[in-house]
């Protein structure tokens, strides 16, 4: 019997662009199942990138095993004005060690990305994310463009249909990799004006939430 759970609304993950998911989604058999009773444990193996300097990224797992959250406190790309020429692109590569309860596997069903953008007229911004399991040839990615003038919070949402989920291999420890990117281009903006895009906040961290789908591994 297959056991699974697709969580409520979210943003870029393995990835067919869609609207937010309902609170629960049906398993292939049409029923509604709970996640495994034991908690998953997620540890950060490595964090690399200009968007996540040491000490600015944290990972937490929800109490009900249905999601994990990545928070950033120094993730900002900018262009124009006196910006550093290399500041137009920032990225962060997370390599996560995921311990799942015995007899279960998981996939990323959806993810929520949020931040703030101040783009001048003529400027553009892009948020991009890609996902893959260590040793797997399957990589999924999505890009989300934003066009100036824009001065507001932003959010991007992708979800994945059950049949298209990429599952962690059963009985094998494979680290999970998430590579995110922010990119800002000044375009036709006046040379003295700055445009920027963040996945952080001056008064608190912006969270990126990844929602999990579960199923039982076949008996060996």
Image: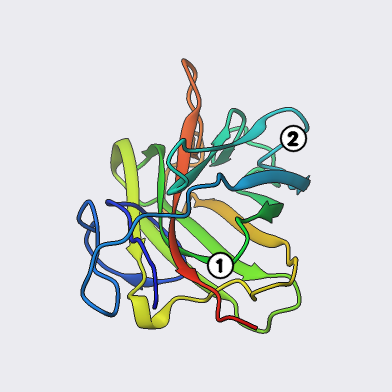
Q: Is residue 53 above or below residue 156?
A: above
Q: Earlier in the sequence, mark 2 or mark 1?
A: 2
| Residue at figure coordinates x 42%, y 41% from the top left | 64
Left/right placement of residue 192 relative to residue 154 reads right
Left/right placement of residue 53 relative to residue 15 reads right
How many residues crowd mark 1 within 10 Å: few (<14), some (14–19), many (20+)? Answer: many
Locate the N terminus by quadrant: bottom left
Please give the residue where the numbered disc 2 appears in the rendered image. Answer: 53
- Residue 19 placed where, x, y %? 22, 61
| Residue at figure coordinates x 39%, y 38% from the top left | 117
Residue nearest the observer in this picture, 194 or 159: 159
Image quadrant of residue 60? top right
Say which element carries label 2.
Answer: loop
Residue nearest the observer in this picture, 131 or 211: 211
- Residue 28 placed where, x, y %? 29, 79
Do the residues bearing badges 2 and 1 touch, measured as CB atoms within 8 Å? no
Q: In this view, does 108 lie above or below 116?
A: below
Please give the residue where the numbered disc 1 appears in the rendered image. Answer: 105
């Amino acid at each position: 019997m297959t056991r699974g759970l697709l969580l409520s609304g979210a943003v870029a993950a393995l990835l067919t662009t869609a609207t937010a998911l309902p609170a629960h989604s049906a398993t292939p058999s049409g029923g509604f199942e709970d996640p495994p009773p034991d908690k998953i444990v997620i540890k950060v193996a490595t964090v690399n990138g200009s968007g996540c300097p040491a000490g600015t990224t944290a990972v937490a797992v929800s109490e009900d095993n249905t999601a994990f959250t990545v928070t950033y406190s120094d993730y900002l790309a900018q262009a124009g004005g006196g910006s550093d020429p290399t500041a137009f692109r920032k990225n962060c590569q997370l390599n996560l060690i995921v311990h799942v309860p015995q007899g279960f596997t998981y996939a990323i069903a959806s993810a929520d990305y949020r931040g703030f953008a101040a783009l001048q007229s003529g400027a553009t911004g892009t948020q991009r994310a890609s996902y893959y399991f260590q040793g797997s040839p399957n990589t999924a990615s999505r890009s989300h463009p934003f066009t100036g003038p824009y001065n507001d919070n932003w959010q991007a949402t992708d979800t994945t249909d059950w049949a298209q989920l990429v599952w962690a291999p059963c009985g094998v420890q494979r680290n999970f990799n998430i590579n995110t990117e922010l990119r800002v281009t000044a375009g036709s903006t006046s040379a003295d004006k700055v445009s920027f895009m963040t996945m952080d906040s001056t008064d608190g961290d912006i969270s990126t939430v990844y929602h999990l789908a579960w199923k039982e591994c076949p008996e060996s």
